[in-house]
Image (spheres, helix red, strand yellow):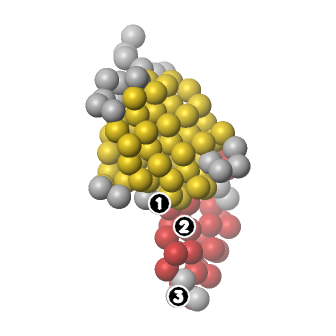
Amino acid sequence: MAAELHVALVAADREVWSGEATLVVARTTSGDIGVMPGHQPLLGVLESGPVTIRTPEGGTVVAAVHGGFISFADNKLSLLAEIAELSDEIDVQHAEQELARAKAEDDTEAQRRADVRLRAATAGR
């Protein structure tokens, strides 16, 4: 059995996902980071981007995360996000429409959110 770490992905309004993982990849202000069991303790600021969680069964959970914090200690990883959605919760067609609207309105922040949602949705399928 592979070593595991406990992961809790929490948004401001709900617990998005919780369970065991062998690897979590997230984007921080310092760049992308991969966290595996036994990783050194860390505290960082999350950037908008997909978070990828590899489960012990070989599955993959992908979420679109928009801002927040990442913390790891004692084999427990907490991802505290302002906004987070699992890939299977994202309506791809709606996200594509949001991206097109944001581009038409030249809204950089909305473009970034829509792009992250689309990347997470397509990576998780």
Q: Which mark is residue 113?
A: 2
Which disc is residue 48 wearing? 1
Q: Closer to the camera, 67 or 106? A: 67
| 118 lies above or below 3 | below
The secondary element bearing badge 3 is classed as loop
Percent across and percent down for residue 68 are 51, 53
Mark 1: which secondary structure? Answer: loop
**Outermost residue, bottom side:** 105
Q: How would you rate the neighbour count of disc 1 (Cα within 10 Å): few for under 14, some for 14-19, many for 20 or more? A: many
Residue 113, placed above or below residue 43 = below
The residue under label 3 is 106
Alpha carbons under labels 1 and 2: distance apart: 7 Å
Q: Is residue 102 left or right of residue 40?
A: right
| Nearer the camera: disc 1 or disc 3 | 1
Gap in angstroms between the C-alphas marked 2 and 3: 13 Å
Amino acid type at image mark 1: Ser
What amino acid does circle 2 point to? Arg
Q: Which residue is drawn at the image coordinates 37% and 16% (left, top)?
A: 2
Discs 1, 3 touching: Cβ within 8 Å: no
- Relative vertical location of residue 85 with respect to residue 24 in this rendering, above or below: below
Identify the mark nearer the N-term, 1 or 3. 1
Residue 87, can we see it? no
Q: Can residue 3 be seen? A: yes
Q: Is residue 52 above or below residue 4?
A: below
| Whole-number angstrom distance, CA of label 1 to CA of label 3 | 18 Å
Residue displayed at 63% across by 74% down: 98
Residues at circles 1 and 2 in contact by the CB criterion of under 8 Å:
yes
